[in-house]
Image (cartoon, rainbow, N blue to C red):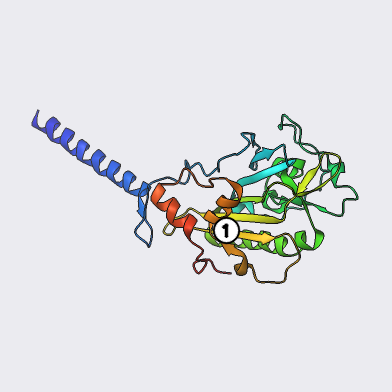
Amino acid sequence: MKKKVISSILLVLVLSYYLYEEKAKLISTDKTGVTNDVKIEVFNYLPTSTSGAIIHHEGYVLSYSEKHEQAEWVAYSLAKNDIVYIDRKRPYFIEDPKVKTKSADWRNYKKSGYDRGHLCPAADRRASEESYNETFYTSNISPQNHDFNAGIWNKLEQQTRYWAQKYNHLYVISGGILEDNLKTIGSEKVSVPNQFYKILLDYTKPEVKAIAFLIPHKESKKPLYQFVVSIDEIEQKTGIDFFPNLPDELENKLESSKDYKNWKF
């Protein structure tokens, strides 16, 4: 009888220690003392939507603005193993079958003088043929000046892939600043943003960090760090709450900062 009691006590102690260790794995403190208790696997990184039209694809999620005929944001997870160099056949641009109001027809861009600029780059989704093809939905593109698209914007996309490989995992959010009285193209009046943004969140231990870029829609030879802004500034321009599911203390710290020294350019 005593042996059974002792065995039961030992079992309880072992289980208690195991549960304590598992809980400890879910709780980490970054270098500034902010506690993070959200597991990366379950953290909902999606921003709020001003339109309510959130579309889920295999490789990314977007919030569609019918008013501007493009996404107000495109968000996706970018892991180190997503960066592959498979030579996939480039598909045609087509309307997004999941947008109930129909996304813009690709012909709006024809002879407009603007590129069909990806918000989620095709190069970020090469690991899966389906995800790669989805990046050619017109819901994932925005009118971009060629020198901007092939220049500073492409440079930022390449830098993002570099950081995904360096830091193993990022959350990426991209979009144009959609506001009233923008220039439009095509019969469906697709808005041409004057600025584009990209927000990156490195939500891995030991240091959770974020960085945001706001770039004027024009050719630029300036270094990327000169376009770093706070996430708060982009939220003020868009009316979007980008990380509403972060613990408040951590969210406030990350979104108010313009510090980029912990990101290696």
Q: Position of residue 215 (x, y in %)?
A: 67, 61
Q: Position of residue 88 (x, y in %)?
A: 78, 49
Say left or right for 242 vs 122.
left
What residue is at 48 percent from the left and 53 percent from the top?
203
Residue positioned most to the front:
181
What residue is at 71 percent from the left and 31 percent from the top?
98
Secondary structure under tag 1 reads strand
Say left or right for 236 vs 133.
left
Residue positioned most to the left:
2
Say left or right for 245 vs 237.
left
Q: Is residue 220 above or below residue 243?
A: below
- The residue closer to the viewer here, 84 or 34, is 34
Q: Quadrant of residue 54?
A: top right
Name the image quarter holding the N terminus: top left
Q: Position of residue 245 (x, y in %)?
A: 46, 43
Exactly how many numbered labels are in the figure? 1
Residue positioned most to the bottom:
222
What residue is at 58 percent from the left and 61 percent from the top?
163
- The residue closer to the viewer here, 138 or 239, is 239
What residue is at 72 percent from the left and 44 percent from the top?
140
Q: Residues within 10 Å of mark 1 (few under 14, many from 20)?
A: many
**What type is the residue that disc 1 sits on?**
Ala
Using the rendered image of the protein, determine whether residue 80 is visible from the camera's viewpoint.
no
Say left or right for 255 vs 248.
right
Q: Can you identify the residue that label 1 sits on?
A: 212
